[in-house]
Image (cartoon, rainbow, N blue to C red):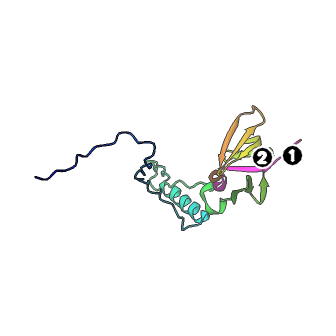
């Protein structure tokens, strides 16, 4: 018959005992996204996708060959508009915050406004008549839905 020592479990650490090293389980590092395309290429792809997913208006029953073609959708009507460093480049001119402008819509409505802020892809303007704010998106300027003109600050 063999005598085995009795195993005891230590519930407390004695003052002179070394500190036990716990098993560290590290969380896996979050996956990093490495973009292979430039920001301009990504924006171009997004514009193309937005064009393709935009719903087409159904043709009227009286004229099945009617296709909605507005002058604003023609390629010649497109304006160059971009935002850089908090400023809007539109129609070969730079526009910045607190600048007085006219905002013309395609239904010939002309609003006197002041540029309130220039975001990543939107311009927020404040109407001078009732001081309400309104957003105009970069795509709307590029498609010609809105037109911006300079206005003297006086």
User: Quarter of the image holding residue 15?
Assistant: top left
Outermost residue, top side: 130
Placement of 111 over or under 53, stated as above or below: above
Q: In front: 77, or 52?
A: 52
Give the magenta range.
141-153
Return the residue at label 2.
Answer: 97
> Alpha-carbon neighbours of circle 1 within 10 Å: few (<14), some, or many (≥20)?
few
Q: In front: 55, or 42?
A: 42
The answer to whether residue 96 is left or right of residue 61 is right
SS state under label 1: loop
Q: In front: 103, or 45?
A: 45
SS state under label 2: loop
Q: In front: 68, or 47?
A: 47
Which label sits on residue 152? 1
> Alpha-carbon neighbours of circle 2 within 10 Å: few (<14), some, or many (≥20)?
some
**Residue 17 at x, y percent in the picture:** 43, 47
Residue placed at 70% from the left, 37% from the top?
133
Residue placed at 54% from the left, 64% from the top?
35
């Amino acid at each position: 018959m063999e005598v085995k020592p009795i195993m005891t479990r230590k519930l407390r650490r004695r003052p002179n005992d070394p500190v036990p090293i716990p098993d560290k389980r590290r969380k896996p590092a979050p996956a990093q996204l490495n973009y292979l395309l430039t920001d301009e290429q990504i924006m171009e792809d997004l514009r193309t996708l937005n064009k393709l997913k935009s719903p087409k208006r159904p043709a009227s029953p009286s004229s099945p060959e009617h296709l909605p073609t507005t002058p604003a959708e023609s390629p010649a009507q497109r304006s160059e508009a971009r935002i850089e460093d908090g400023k809007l480049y539109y129609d070969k001119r730079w526009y910045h915050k607190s600048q007085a402008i006219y905002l013309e819509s395609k239904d010939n409505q002309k609003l006197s406004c002041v540029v309130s802020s220039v975001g990543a892809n939107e311009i927020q303007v404040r109407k001078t008549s009732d001081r309400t704010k309104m957003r105009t998106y970069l795509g709307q300027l590029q498609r010609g839905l809105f037109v911006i003109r300079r206005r003297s600050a006086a």
